[in-house]
Amino acid sequence: MAMNRDDVFAKVRDVLVEALGVDDDEVTEDATLQGDLGAESIDFLDIVFRLEKSFSIKIPRGELFPDDVINNPDYVENGRLTRAGLEQLKKSMPHADFSAFEANPDISRMPELFTVNTIVKFVQDKLKAA
Amino acid sequence: MRWMWIDNFAEFESGARAVGVKNVTAAEEHLHDAFAGYPLLPPSLMIEGMAQTAGVLVGEARGFKENVILAKVRRAEFEDYAVPGDQLRYEATIESIDDLAAMTSGVVYKNGQRMGSVDLLFSHVGKSGSAMGLPDHNFVFAENFMSLLSTYRVGQSR
């Protein structure tokens, strides 16, 4: 039976509560994983694994949390994404909301793209494609 | 003192699961720190025992070609405590493993009864570890841990 968005959100919230040791009510739609929920780099691996188990999906390395743009010197200049870098990142992360980021694409602001909503959208897209 | 918190392997299925055995003894100094007059094995050292069991399992699955570092304790829950005379079994299972990391789940048994669970995340650190200030030679799988495996395998061939 297909899951509606509320069901997906509830399971994503459970994953983040378990992985990050936060309370239910801290996991809001717009909460950022690193800034608001305290996630560290190792937690991202744990989150991917738990999402795979919870939703019975496969998430190849770099699909949910891509790192190809930030590590490519063609896409970063003076600490900001170039236009090409921004376009490539949008292609790599169709599940993220770039409306606030693209006005000032400073790479130090990239963690702001990884919100709870980003994960929910990613999982919904995955489930539709399955 | 050698930092070995398992005594031997009772079972070892390459790439899948392993069972490490720990005999808790009154001769261990650390037990008498908690608590004075009532020595018990601190839960942190049961987590370490599981980490050593699972770490060797994960390392062996990839031919010990890189260092395997405990990166995160994903879950550790204990329903009981262990005292001198108890025998613990750490049953570790590989849940996923790839070039970057491995996830393991584990159950702790005390004298045959389930008493806890410990789920871990390991990072694989090869030559790139030098960028993080880590040595690029094998500093994890030293003689201590390798002898556990060879002792188990000699026992199996008898």
Image: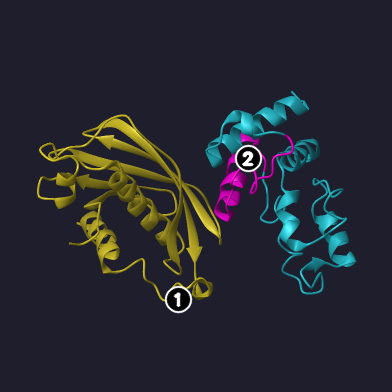
Chain colours: A cyan, B yellow
Mark yes or no: residue A3 visible.
no
Inspect this view and state whether residue B1 appears. Answer: yes
> Is A81 inside the magenta-drawn segment?
no
Q: Residue at x 84, y 50 (%)?
A: A98
Q: Is residue B72 left or right of residue B111?
A: right
**Depicted A4 relative to depicted A31: above or below:** above
In the image, A111 versus B19, the foreground residue is A111
**Same chain, marks 2 and 1?**
no
Q: Which residues are magenta?
A: A29-57
- Which quadrant: the C terminus of chain A? top right
Marks 2/1: CA distance?
32 Å
**How dense is the environment of label 2, judged by Cα within 10 Å: few (below 14), some, or many (20 and up)?**
many
What residue is disc 1 on? B136
Secondary structure beneath disc 1?
Answer: loop
Judging from the image, mark 2 belongs to the subunit labelled: A
The local crowd at label 1, few if under 14, some if 14 to 19, many if 20 or more residues have their Cα within 10 Å, is: some
Above/below status of B105 relative to A106: above
Within the image, what quadrant is residue A108 found in? bottom right
Numbered label attached to residue A51: 2
Left or right of residue B50, residue A109 in this image? right
| Position of B123 relative to A8 (above/below) | below
Quadrant of the image for the N terminus of chain A?
Answer: top right
Q: Is residue B155 above or below residue B139?
A: above
Tell me if A33 is positioned left or right of B83 in this view.
right
Residue drawn 81% across the image and 58% down it: A89
Name the quadrant containing residue A8. top right
Residue type for callout 1: Asp
Residue at 31%, 45% in the rendered image: B44
Q: Could you say which is closer to the camera, residue B105 or residue A65?
A: A65
